[in-house]
Amino acid sequence: MGVYQQFYDHWRDSPSKFRDTSTTYTLSLMDPDIESKLSISPKHTTGNKILVTRAYEDMHHRLLRLRGNDKGRTQGVVITGQPGIGGSIITRSAPPATSHRCMSAPGKTTFLGFMLARLISAKQIVVLCNSTKVLLFYCGRVYSQEASLGFRGLPINQHNAQYCPIWALVDSRKGGPNIIRSSNIWPIQTSSPNPDRWKEWRKQNGAVVLGMPLWDTDDLVKG
């Protein structure tokens, strides 16, 4: 857990490096020798830097709004699209669930790394999941358990005396723990368009399905 603990310490104790603007910019998630050991490390980037596009910032704020509107429920979001640059569908499954739009959605896994850093810097309790591990970032320490154990044993998260599900970032490229309605989490799952990976929990939770837009000219130049 040493490498994840260093990542946690870096973002908890450092001033925010996010610009939070509509301008594309580069961001170092961690020192190169540390980030290369992280499973969230983007293989297609230069060194330890990621390109933070306007789509990333827009998605971050949209997730915050969706979470705020859930009022303690475990609705959650699926971010889907083809691996790399491909097609995806945006659907609002909660009422009024009427619009559909095709887009491309590059960088879903990289976005999870960006979102993890964002949430840690905001002093949030976060769970990061992959096919083998469930990692809990909580009160200055990183805890781990096997993915087969799912989301058991998570702490109760309260804010202003109200129950708040824990943010869970789930990379489902190679499976991962099952998401059920009783889980103490607010899941954000990245996935290919194959609905078998998320259709059941999406239906149970009334989750939202989102995709990211194609990079624009400014993104391509800076990338």
Image (cartoon, rainbow, N blue to C red):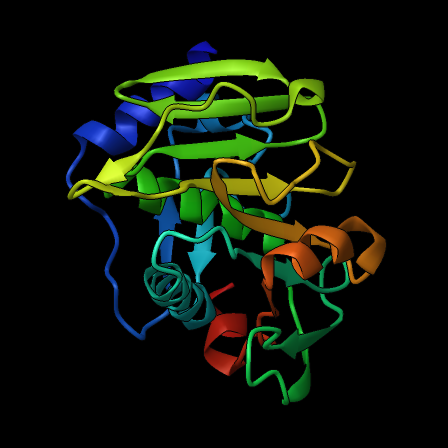
Horizontal and vertical percent for residue 37? 55, 22
| Near-viewer residue (47 or 50) | 50
Name the residue located 60 percent from the left edge and 56 percent from the top edge.
205
Residue 159 visible: yes
| Residue 124 pos. (x, y %) | 29, 38
Q: Residue at x 19, y 45 (%)?
A: 16
Residue extending furthest toward the top: 2
Q: Is residue 25 left or right of residue 194?
A: left
Q: Quadrant of residue 192?
A: bottom right
**Image height of 185 relative to 105, above or below:** above
**Placement of 35 over or under 65, stated as above or below:** above
Q: Position of residue 15 (x, y in %)?
A: 15, 40
Could you tell me how many numbered marks the image carries?
0
Q: Residue at x 15, y 44 (%)?
A: 160
For residue 182, which quarter of the picture?
top right
Camera sees residue 37: no
Left or right placement of residue 180 versus residue 153 in this view: right
Q: Is residue 7 above or below residue 23?
A: above
| Closer to us: 106 or 96 | 96
Q: Residue at x 62, y 58 (%)?
A: 78
Residue 193: percent from left, percent from top: 79, 62
